[in-house]
Image (spheres, rainbow, N blue to C red):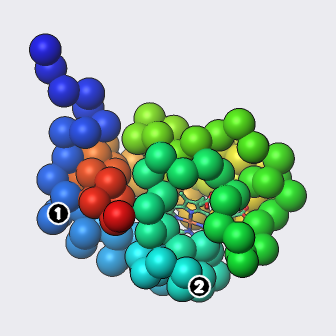
Amino acid sequence: MTASPAFAGDASAGSDVFKSECAECHSIKEGRNKKGPSLFGVVGRKAAAVPDYEYSDALRAQSAWVWTPEQLHSYLGQPAKRANPGTKMKYDGLNDPKQLDDLISYLGTLH
Ligand code: HEC
């Protein structure tokens, strides 16, 4: 059996990816929202589920989305406005597959 690519990353390298790509807008502290919502516990969480964060209607409309590693792969691997037209997340996507795997492994440690 081979591990799913989404789980094959190096979380400590992913922490550096997070700092350079995401930390400007996202905190990893529970309850701390910046421009974007806190990403504490994001893996396994439903989309638009942080209670005191004001999401766009576009993301709120994705109530069937759950932030699985696969969903995060698809969301973060392309411009956010293509993954979710109308979103207020202004991010062009991470196109390095290794950095993406590392980042998602790191996000999985935030519990
Ligand atoms: C320029 C600011 C900005 C950057 C950079 C950014 N984000 Fe976001 N992010 C946002 C905003 C704003 C939202 C809320 C989107 C909405 O409501 O449409 C968001 C939403 C999200 C969500 C959905 C959260 C939820 O509770 O449903 C995830 C997951 C996410 N971002 C991950 C990331 C990751 C990982 C990175 C780095 C690769 C990143 N973002 C980079 C601003 C940003």
Q: Position of residue 42 (x, y in %)?
A: 48, 58
For the point 15% across and 20% down, the residue is 2
Instruction: From the viewer's perspective, tell me whether residue 74 is left or right of residue 3.
Output: right
Q: Position of residue 23 (x, y in %)?
A: 43, 79
Question: Splitting the image into four quadrants, where does ligand 1 fall?
Answer: bottom right
For the point 24% across and 72% down, the residue is 16
Q: Measure the C-alpha gap from mark 2 to mark 1.
A: 23 Å
Q: Which residue is mark 1?
A: 13
Q: Position of residue 64 (x, y in %)?
A: 71, 36
- Name the residue type under label 1: Ala
Q: Is mark 2 within 8 Å of ligand 1?
A: yes
Q: Which residue is mark 2?
A: 34
Instruction: From the viewer's perspective, tell me whether residue 28 is left or right of residue 61.
Output: left
Q: Quadrant of residue 25?
A: bottom right
Q: Secondary structure at mark 1?
A: helix
As drawn, the label of residue 45 is none
Q: Secondary structure at mark 2?
A: loop
Q: Quadrant of residue 111?
A: bottom left
Mark yes or no: residue 72 visible: no
Q: Is residue 26 above or below residue 45?
A: below
Mark yes or no: residue 57 visible: yes
- Name the residue type under label 2: Lys
